[in-house]
Amino acid sequence: RKGTVIITGASSGLGLATAKALAETGKWHVIMACRDFLKAERAAKSAGISKENYTVMHLDLASFDSVRQFVANFKQSGRPLDVLVCNAAVYQPTAKEPTFTADGIELSVGTNHLGHFLLSRLLLDDMKKSDYPSKRLIIVGSITGNTNTLAGNVPPKASLGDMRGLAGGLNGLNSSTMIDGGKFDGAKAYKDSKICNMLTMQEFHRRYHEETGITFASLYPGCIATTGLFREHIPLFRLLFPPFQKFITKGYVSEEESGKRLAQVVSDPSLTKSGVYWSWNKDSASFENQLSEEASDVSKARKVWEISEKIVGLA
Ligand code: NDP
């Protein structure tokens, strides 16, 4: 049978390119889990994904109710779940003030980390039940959350500190909107959320890999300087960033190439190792990359997991 893969945020950028790459193989049915139904339908059409290979289902990661509703709808569809890709993200590098999810949580960490945390926890049972030979849960990471790299050292650097802000619910009322308890900084909130993504993947691996056989993985797909992720950046940045990445850092990848990379992590038989953070070298060959000290800190991973469980209502 065809595999079923859920991809969050498949209405643009990396998610859309991955949906296309997988649909084209004829071996996958892609559930495009998106907050804007029409945009996703149009994106699928203009990417040329044929109708029998995808379904759009509504999911707004910035609302725990919506996440729960999505999971209920998916279960009702009767499809098995073979692979889940947590890809969607918001990035607000120029925001002066925080914005909030439906549950009153700072938007970047609320969407990128907590929405996906709830989603993957609720869908784990479905993945356990699937009889697919290689089941995988993939959380898209980033080099920017990784302070052992050059790009990860561009200030403001990611740091979770003692997580007092996260423990307080990131609500800006009786707690800070930043995980480490500091003053709001949109670029840092994004990087912190990506550290949480990478820690969550490893914690899943430690807790569930042996028991379930599911492969848990993360990746840095390369710098896809043309995606909507940079939509909120200043115009000059948006103009100069793609050529800068292409010619100076040479980290640039096209959306199409990045989609092929993520599609490999979904389905390539040689990428089944669990607990791995994949990257690609300049010849586009995959390798197991090292995570920064903070992004591989076992006790921080456990703490992120435990606090997140409370916030999303699982503990
Ligand atoms: P895009 O902005 O193009 O795509 C992000 C997707 O997330 C969009 O489909 C967007 O939906 C969706 N999304 C945002 N908020 C929500 C929400 N509340 N509920 C559901 N979906 C939501 O960016 P990219 O393709 O670049 O980013 C994809 C992933 O790649 C992210 O995890 C990012 O961190 C990662 N990444 C990107 C890099 C890059 O250079 N671009 C580098 C490293 C990692 P909508 O279409 O409705 O806006």
Image (cartoon, helix red, strand yellow):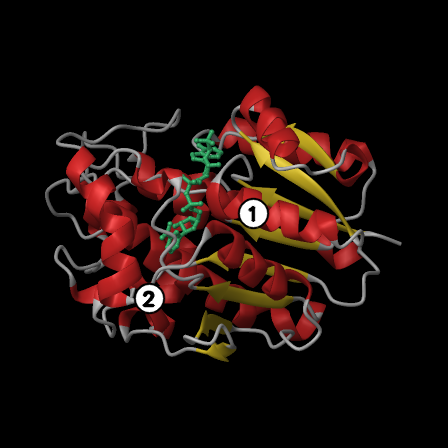
- Residue 259 in sight from this viewpoint: yes
Residue at 41% over, 62% down: 198
Between 72 and 195, the one nearer to me in the picture? 195
Callouts 1 and 2 close, C-beta under 8 Å: no
Residue at 50% over, 29% down: 60
3D distance between C-alphas at marks 1 and 2:
33 Å
Question: What kind of element bears circle 2?
Answer: helix
In the displayed structure image, the side of residue 79 where residue 23 appears, left or right: left
Q: Nearer the viewer, mark 1 or mark 2?
A: 1
Residue at 24% over, 74% down: 148
Between 14 and 295, the one nearer to me in the picture? 14
Residue furthest to the top: 38
> Which image quadrant for residue 31?
top right
Sequence-first tag of 1 and 2: 1
Amino acid found under the numbered disc labelled 1: Ala
Q: Quadrant of ligand 1?
A: top left
- Residue 124 in sight from this viewpoint: no
Which quadrant is home to the N terminus? bottom right
Amino acid found under the numbered disc labelled 2: Lys
Residue 165 drawn at (x, y percent): 22, 46
Residue 153 drawn at (x, y percent): 17, 66
Residue 178 drawn at (x, y percent): 20, 45
Question: What kind of element bears circle 1?
Answer: helix
In the displayed structure image, the side of residue 116 where residue 79 appears, left or right: right
Pointer 1 residue Cβ closer than 8 Å to ligand 1 = yes
* Mark 2 nearby-residue class (10 Å; few <14, some 14–19, many ≥20): many
- Residue that carries the numbered disc 2 in the rendered image: 300
Q: Is 246 located above or below residue 275 in the figure? A: above
- Residue that carries the numbered disc 1 in the rendered image: 17
Residue at 65% over, 36% down: 71
